Amino acid sequence: MKKGLMILFQIGVIIVFTWIGKYIASLLHVPIPGSIIGMILLFFGLHSGLIKLNWVQAGAALIISEMMLFFIPAVVGFMQYSWIFGIKGLSILFIVVSGTALMMIATGVISERIQERKGGEVRRWLPRFFM
Amino acid sequence: MVTKIFYVIITVLFYFFAKKVNRKKPGLLFSPIILTPVMLIVLLLIMDIPYKEYANGTYPLNELLDVVTVALAIPLYRNWSFLAKNWRVIVCSLAAGSLIAVVSGILCTYLLAMGKDYMLSIIPRIVTIPIAVSLSESIGGTPAITVLFSMLTCFVGVFIGPAIMKHFSIKHPLSIGMMYGLGAQALGTAKAFQIGEKEGTTSSVSYILTAILTVIWALILTPFIHTLNV
């Protein structure tokens, strides 16, 4: 029971940061979501020591591990696009699958090769920039 | 008011039910992110409830998505030195990945002759949805199409992730995190946290960085699209 309350309190602290972030975003008129601003603020709060890690840690761990739940309403929104099961939907699916595969492979392979070379003999193959 | 709470409760219940099913039947089709929406869509169709009403009712869950984004500051703080040490690798890989994403999107829509509207709307698809909507507007695309592309991309990214990791033997936490962050943004981050904290944090940093990089590529490339005659 006590632990549950503590987690609720910790989530409350994070919610306060979300509100502050959104408020700042509404003042700034820039296309940066308030949640990103809130995240940056909380990060600096932790970094500077104003916020202690164990004030927020357990609450954050809980909501991060159940993150999928919060996506569900958005995914249910697919029911609005029933035409996706038609011909146009197929070409869209083709574009998305091929493009996503390509970019993920590129990112993963580039990073992986750099990691390998960092540790291996071939280090001099790369400019110093990567070291 | 009562029905609004009903939508939230039913979503949460279905979600935990789907998680339970997934523990017994591990597999793509039984993952909570597929099973729960499918059950909900069936329910909404049977009860003849329009999506708008459901979306209004589950608004609190959507709000919590923002709270989760803020909560990502905690793993970010804990893994900061790991990320700072590797910032060059991160920036290089993501710059390449996002450029490929933008170019492949433009090329595919061009080759399939889907029109300028789709060409512009597909560009922000690897940008996290709230930013993607404003980017789509500012380059002259249609936000609704962009949102559809973004969501599909997230989905596809999460599902092809394991196969890519296997076939291209991608093992480093940094590479895995970036792949999920670039390909599937927040949804990919959820998946990456299931693999490990380093992967998850890298993924969350990646999707923010990808957003910034894609905005830059988009601003460079859209003038060319506007000059095309399609």
Image: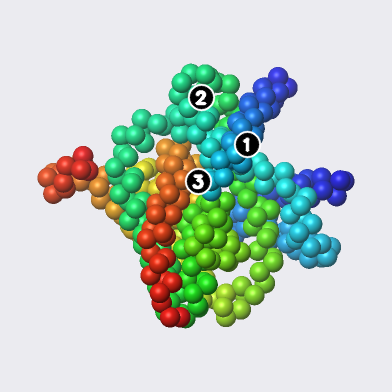
- Helix, strand or loop for disc 3: helix
Query: Which chain hosts label 3?
Result: B
Q: Return the x and y of residue A1 as percentages of the image width and height.
A: 73, 22
Kindly report which numbered mark, 2 or 1, lies closer to the viewer in this rendering: 1
Q: Is residue B63 shown left or right of residue A97?
A: right
**Coloring scheme of the render?**
rainbow
Q: CA distance from mark 1 to mark 3?
A: 25 Å
Kindly report which numbered mark, 2 or 3, lies closer to the viewer in this rendering: 2
Q: Amino acid at mark 1?
A: Tyr
> To which residue does mark 2 refer?
A45
For the residue pair A123 and A43, the one nearer the viewer reads as A43
Kindly report which numbered mark, 1 or 3, lies closer to the viewer in this rendering: 1
Q: Do dots 2 and 1 share one subunit?
A: yes
> Which residue is at a point 47% across and 71% down the rendered structure image?
B119
> To which residue does mark 3 refer?
B189
Specify few, some or many for label 1: CA neighbours under 10 Å numbering under 14, 14-19, or 20 or more.
some
Q: CA distance from mark 2 to mark 1?
A: 17 Å
> To which residue does mark 1 refer?
A23
Q: Is residue B224 visible?
A: yes
Q: Is residue B32 visible?
A: no
Q: Return the x and y of residue B117 as percentages of the image width and height.
A: 52, 72
Q: Amino acid at mark 3?
A: Thr
Q: Return the x and y of residue A46 as percentages of the image width and height.
A: 49, 24
For the residue pair A36 and B230, the one nearer the viewer reads as B230
